[in-house]
C-alpha cells in the first residue's frame, strides 16, 4: 500500500467529509422537496418516489465494483471520479424540465456515490491506525450519518427561499472544494494487484436481481400485486437469486467476495447496517406527511431535524468512546433500539398539530442519538479485521448495505404509505408507513446479538512484559 499510517491531516479529513456530504446533499435533500419538484415538473408521485430511491439503488448496485476498482486503480483516483460524476448528475438535474433528465441525473449521482464511499473509507484506513483511525472514521461518519440530517435542513432552506434546483448548485460547489482539499493526499492502492478478471457475469446478475426486486417494491401497487407482470418479476427475481448464488459460489474471482463473510463480526456489521438504514429511510414518509397533511414548507420540515443533526454529531464521538470502553455489541444494539423509538414517535399522527410537531422534533432528536451512537462501532468492526488489499471491496460491500438498505427502506415505507393513502386516511397511512421501521429494528438487534462478540473493537489494556522476557 502506498503511503504510511498516521500520515493523514485534518485538511484531508475535511476534504473526505465534504466528498461524502455531496452524496447526502442530493440524496437526503430530495426527500424534503418531493412536493416542490412534483409541482414544478408535473410528474407523478410514483415517478418521484422512484427518482428518490434511484440514487441509493444505483449506489448499491455499483459500490462493490467501485470498491474493488479503488483497490486496484487507487482510492484517490476513484474519489475524484466520483466527485466529477456528482457534478455531471447535478447539472442534469438543474437543467431538467421533465422526469427524464431528473432520473438520469439521479442514476449518475448514485454511481458517483458508489465511487466516493468505499474509496474514502479506504483512504482513511491507509492514513490512520488505532485510536487515530477510530477518530478519523468518526469524522467520516459525521458526513455519512450526520450528513443526512444536516442536508435535510440545508436543502429545505435552499428549496424554500431559493428554489430546489439551487440545492444541486451548492452540491457542485462542495464537490469542487473537496477536490481542492484532497489535491495533495497520497494515492493509496493494494500492494498486490489481483490478476483475476472482473466478474462481469456476477455483476450483471446482481444488477438484474436488484432492479427486479426494486421494481416489485416500488411499482407492485401500480402494476397490481397479482398481475402477470408483477408475478413475472417476483418469479424472475427468485430465479436470478438462485442462479447468482449457484454461479458465484463456484468462482474463484467473485463479484461479491463471500470469503469476507467468514468473519462473523463483519457479517453482523454489514447486515445490521442494511437494516439500520432501513429504519432511517422511513423519515421519507414522515417528511412527506408533515408537508401534505400539516402544511409545512420544506424549510420548516427541515427545521424539525435540527435536533437530529446535533444529536448525530455529538453521539458519533460518544459511540467511538463506547466502542473503546465496552466493545461494539452493546452500543450497536442500544443504538438500534433508540433510533427505532425516535422514528416511531413520528408515527403518532393522531395528535393535534402543536403537540404532534413537538413529538416529531423529539422523535427526530432521539433517532439522531441512536444513529450517531451506531456509526463508529459499526464501521470500525467492518474494516478493522480486513486485510489492507481487501479494504476497498470490503468497504464497498458495507456501503452497498447502506445504500440498498436506505433504498429499500424508502421503497417499502412509501409503498405501504401509497397503498393506504389511496384507500383511506392520510394520517393512518403515514402511521403504518413509518412503523415499517420496527421490522428492520427487530431483525437488526437479533443480527448484532448473534454475530458481534462483546469485546469486539474494545480497547485492549497494555500488557506488562515480564522482566525475564526482556533479557
Image (cartoon, rainbow, N blue to C red):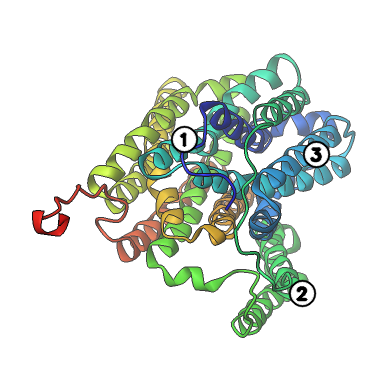
Residue 420 location in percent, x, y?
59, 50
Q: Secondary structure at mark 1?
A: loop
Q: Vertical placement of 120 versus 58: above or below? A: above
Q: Which residue is mark 3?
A: 89
Query: What residue occupies the far left of the structure in this picture?
Result: 467
Badge 3 element: helix
Q: Secondary structure at mark 2?
A: helix
Q: Is residue 164 shown left or right of residue 187?
A: right
The residue at the point 28 percent across, 44 percent down is 324
Q: Nearer the viewer, residue 144 or 294?
A: 144
* Tag shown at residue 252: none
Q: Residue at x 75, y 75 (%)?
A: 201
- The residue indicated by pointer 2 is 228
Label 1 or label 2, whichever comes before in sequence order: 2
How far from the left and from the top, in percent, is residue 258? 54, 73
In the picture of the structure, the residue carrying the numbered disc 1 is 349
Amino acid at each position: 500500500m502506498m503511503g504510511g499510517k498516521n500520515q493523514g491531516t485534518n485538511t484531508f479529513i475535511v476534504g473526505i467529509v465534504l466528498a461524502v456530504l455531496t452524496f447526502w446533499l442530493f440524496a437526503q435533500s430530495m426527500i424534503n422537496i418531493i412536493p416542490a419538484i412534483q409541482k414544478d415538473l408535473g410528474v407523478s408521485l410514483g415517478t418521484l418516489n422512484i427518482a428518490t430511491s434511484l440514487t441509493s439503488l444505483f449506489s448499491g448496485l455499483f459500490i462493490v465494483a467501485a470498491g474493488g476498482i479503488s483497490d486496484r486503480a487507487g482510492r484517490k483516483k476513484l474519489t475524484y471520479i466520483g466527485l466529477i460524476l456528482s457534478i455531471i448528475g447535478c447539472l442534469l438535474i438543474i437543467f431538467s424540465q421533465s422526469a427524464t433528465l431528473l432520473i438520469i441525473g439521479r442514476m449518475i449521482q448514485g454511481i458517483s456515490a458508489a465511487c466516493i464511499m468505499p474509496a474514502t473509507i479506504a483512504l482513511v484506513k491507509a492514513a490512520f491506525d488505532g485510536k487515530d483511525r477510530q477518530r478519523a472514521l468518526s469524522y467520516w461518519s459525521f458526513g455519512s450519518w450526520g450528513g443526512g440530517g444536516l442536508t435535510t435542513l440545508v436543502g429545505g432552506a435552499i428549496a424554500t427561499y431559493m428554489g430546489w434546483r439551487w440545492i444541486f448548485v451548492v452540491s457542485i460547489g462542495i464537490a469542487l472544494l473537496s477536490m481542492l482539499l484532497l489535491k495533495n493526499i497520497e494515492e493509496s492502492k493494494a500492494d498486490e494487484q489481483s490478476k483475476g478478471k472482473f466478474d462481469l457475469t456476477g455483476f450483471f446478475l446482481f444488477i438484474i436481481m436488484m432492479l427486479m426486486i426494486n421494481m416489485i417494491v416500488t411499482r407492485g401497487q401500480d402494476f397490481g400485486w397479482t398481475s402477470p407482470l408483477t408475478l413475472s418479476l417476483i418469479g424472475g427475481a427468485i430465479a436470478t437469486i438462485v442462479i447468482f448464488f449457484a454461479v458465484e459460489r463456484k468462482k474463484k474471482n467473485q463479484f461479491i467476495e463471500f470469503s469476507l463473510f467468514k468473519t462473523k463480526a463483519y457479517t453482523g456489521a454489514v447486515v445490521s447496517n442494511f437494516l439500520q438504514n432501513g429504519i432511517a429511510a422511513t423519515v421519507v414518509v414522515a417528511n412527506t406527511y408533515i408537508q401534505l397533511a400539516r402544511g409545512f414548507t420544506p424549510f420548516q420540515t427541515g427545521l424539525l431535524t435540527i435536533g437530529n443533526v446535533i444529536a448525530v454529531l455529538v453521539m458519533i464521538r460518544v459511540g467511538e468512546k463506547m466502542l473503546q470502553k465496552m466493545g461494539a455489541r452493546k452500543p450497536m444494539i442500544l443504538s438500534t433500539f433508540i433510533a427505532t423509538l425516535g422514528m416511531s414517535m413520528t408515527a403518532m399522527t393522531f395528535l393535534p398539530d402543536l403537540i404532534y410537531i413537538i413529538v416529531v422534533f423529539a422523535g427526530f432528536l432521539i433517532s439522531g442519538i441512536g444513529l450517531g451512537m451506531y456509526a463508529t462501532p459499526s464501521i470500525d468492526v467492518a474494516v478493522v479485521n480486513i486485510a489492507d488489499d481487501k479494504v476497498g471491496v470490503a468497504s464497498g460491500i458495507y456501503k452497498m448495505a447502506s445504500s440498498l438498505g436506505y433504498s429499500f427502506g424508502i421503497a417499502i415505507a412509501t409503498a405501504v404509505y401509497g397503498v393506504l393513502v389511496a384507500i383511506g386516511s392520510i394520517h393512518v397511512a403515514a402511521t403504518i408507513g413509518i412503523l415499517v421501521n420496527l421490522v428492520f429494528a427487530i431483525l437488526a438487534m437479533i443480527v448484532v446479538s448473534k454475530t458481534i462478540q462483546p469485546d469486539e473493537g474494545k480497547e485492549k489494556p497494555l500488557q506488562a512484559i515480564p522482566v525475564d522476557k526482556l533479557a
